Amino acid sequence: MGASGDMLLAALLAAGADRDALAPVEAALPVRYEVSETIEHGIGATSVAVVLTDDEVDGPSKVPAQGHSHDEGEGHSHSHGDGEGHSHSHGDGHDHAHSDHSHEDHDHSHSHDTPAEGHGPSRSYDEVRAIVEEMDLPTDVERDALAIFDILGAAEASVHDTTLDEMHFHEVGADDAIADVVGACLLLDDLAVERVVTTPLSAGGGTVAMSHGTYPVPGPAVVEIAQRADWSLSGGPVEAELLTPTGAAILAHVADGVDALPEIAVETSGYGAGGYDFEDRPNVLRAIVGDGSGGLRRDEITVLETNLDDATPEVLGGLQERLHGAGARDVSILPATMKKSRPGHLVKVICKPEDSQRVARRLAEETGTLGVREHGAGHRWIAQREIVTASIEIDGECYAVDVKIASDTDGQVFDVSGEYDDAAAVADETGRPVREVLRRAENAI
């Protein structure tokens, strides 16, 4: 079904994530996660509400923010059903499958607490990024949270025909939305998730009230996000908003789309409850945790390219490093024949979709190109990668060489490669051939 931030939090907690993993958010923002248990149509479920801890309901956050909202106000999450929808895998071959069946960013039972939703300041895109960066999060968690807000920002900017730098968030930039996004990333990290899959997401139907008026479901931002996502979108099966921008953006970043629950040896499951009550179905999201079959990991990418006919060798020589610094995953520079048979170069860059605008700008700044093409490649299949340090002995001395190990999601190793720069440094010091140093390091693993 659909997805929202609070239901994803509840489902992950019900699936075994540690509540204490959410502490960095509570330390940085004036909010608290209220976790409780409830019953939905006979199903025991976990409920999560983000509530304010400040005495003044509309008071500022601990991190100041200014600006006006240009957001659509789609900060709720409604869904229902109980089919399988998401799957997460661990480094030891575990998969977690979540089915989004219903959810909404509302509180079930904490009538004495003030829900954070609808309160607090609006923020610019840069202000939201600054808050996340100041939370002292694990590197991977910070990267994922920022990527999700990049997706949200790009969708809102497209809807409102503005730029990402000029974007202001309202509901999706408030404290509760930041708590949803960063909280989901923290819980996924706590579960050591390496893969997430989701079955098609139901958007619901009818209309929804936003800060700019009443819009049909799915809202414009959700449609924009779905265009960037790997999973598919469908309408119904009820007249309610089942998929919110926050939930859609989280899943757009972390989840691969599948038609049905993949093969899984189930270990545990849990349900996250939403705020809507439907007469004919439980308003819950189910998470299934288990061992999945091994394979390569799907990585969502896009490809940028441009033709250059006047780039100097010095510019081309430093281009890869400069583009990697902007978020590029891989850079290729190929010889090409340009107009009037002039020699030139074709630069191809692989990056994450949410990084494409930043990487394209850096490419233009570094090369002076007048245009950058984007090809929606969709995804690539990549191995799990681990760097270990091998210790080798040469003439009685020990030397360290990093070695890259490639494996599938079950941990089956199919490639071991020593890092050339490390091996070259050892070769220079010992007088041995680089190939010998590489072979020794790889055999030491």
Image (cartoon, rainbow, N blue to C red):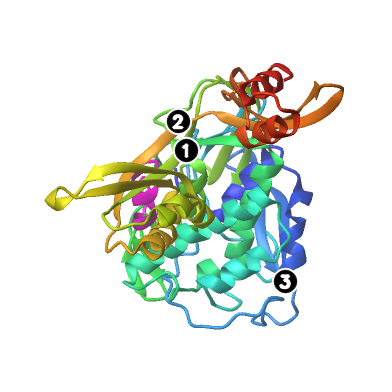
SS type, badge 1 = strand
Mark 2: give few (<14), some (14-19) or many (20+) Cα within 10 Å: few
Q: Is residue 140 left or right of residue 204?
A: right
Q: Amino acid at mark 3?
A: Pro
Rendered residue at 64%/81% (across/down): 58
Q: Magenta stretch: residue 234 in it?
A: yes
Residue 440 percent coordinates (x, y): 70, 19
Q: Which residue is mark 3?
A: 30
Residue 274 percent coordinates (x, y): 56, 52
Rendered residue at 74%/76% (across/down): 54
Q: Which residue is mark 2?
A: 381
Q: CA distance from mark 3 to mark 1?
A: 35 Å
Q: Which residue is mark 1?
A: 299
Residues in magenta?
223-239
Quarter of the N terminus within the rendering? top left
Q: Residue furthest right?
A: 396
SS type, badge 3 = loop
Q: Amino acid at mark 2?
A: Trp
Q: Magenta stretch: residue 277 in it?
A: no
